[in-house]
Amino acid sequence: MSLPDELWRWILELGVNTSCLTYKDLCCISMSCRRLNRLSKEDVLWSKLLFFDFPAHVSSSTDRQSPKSIYQIRFEKDKVKKLLAERRAVLRIESRIHEHTRKLHEIEGRLVDENEKLKAAIDELKGLRRVKEASTALKVWQPEIIHSRQKQIVENCSVPVGFRINALEMEIKLCKQHISGFLRARKDENDRLEAAKERLSKVKYHPLQSSGLDDESRNSRKSTGNNLKRVKHE
């Protein structure tokens, strides 16, 4: 701390101008000692921070407050705005999760219906094949008791066996295609649901996070610095 104030001012200004120091860094520096507390509160530093972090508000500001006070006001407003934006993002993701869950339930219901339809078609096809076998068996000699049983099976069938068997085989094939499509749709929808849940957990979980202004501030200052360099070269 044997350096003169002018050199400390130059160091602090250089840190702000080169994006090495943010508002948070200046607040931490101000707690180190009385001298740095006084130097870190100087208007020139906070005016630059105000320009870099809230450029849209600098020219319109006619307040007689200190740049640091104005910065604090802008910071709190920006923080509230970001909290509201975060809440809207959470609501949007929760809405997507609800929609994915609804679609999953719908797909599950259609899968159950299609499986029941497939089972019924398979059972009916087995019965008709027994009728077809019985009809074929009637054309050959059999003991009377077996012959009468086969004849009863054939007589109980009221639809053309061959036509109905072909129709059931097509229906079973179609059911299997539908089931395969529903299984793929369920997997895709479940993947979307898990991705939305993961996104929601990331949005909700912010360990020791400030308003997120640090990175934006640095990026803004780098962009401003690059623009100034290009103007000088031109």
Image (cartoon, helix red, strand yellow):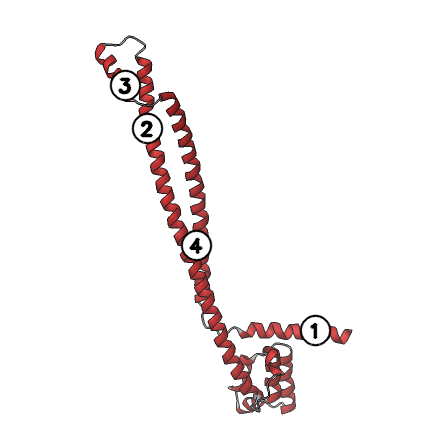
Q: Which residue is drawn at 46% across and 62% down?
A: 92
Q: Give the amino acid at mark 4.
A: Leu
Q: Residue 112 carries which label?
A: none
Alpha carbon separation for disc pair 4 and 2:
38 Å
Nearer to us of marks 1 and 2 is: 2
Circle 4 residue: 193
Which of disc 4 and disc 1 is earlier in sequence?
A: 4
Image mark for residue 227: 1
Residue at 53% x, 89% y: name it: 33
Q: In which quarter of the image is the C terminus?
A: bottom right
Query: Label 2 sits on what residue type?
Result: Glu
Instruction: Name which of mark 3 and mark 4 comes first in the sequence.
Output: 3
Q: Is mark 3 on a helix, strand or loop?
A: helix
Q: Which residue is drawn at 45% across and 61% down?
A: 93
Which dot, 1 or 3, sits closer to the camera? Answer: 3
Mark before the other along the chain sequence, 1 or 2: 2
Number of the front mark, 4 or 2: 2
Badge 3 is on which residue? 155
Quarter of the image where the N terminus is located: bottom right
Residue 26 image point, x, y percent: 55, 83
Q: Mark 2 points at which residue?
A: 124
Instruction: Specify which label sits upstream in the sequence, 2 or 3.
Output: 2
From this view, report whether residue 30 is shown above or below residue 206.
below
Q: Where is residue 189 in the image (x, y as percent from the top left)?
A: 44, 50
Marks 1/4: CA–CA distance: 43 Å
- Relative placement, left or right, of 23 versus 109 is right
The CA span between labels 2 and 3 is 16 Å
Where disc 4 sits, the SS reads helix
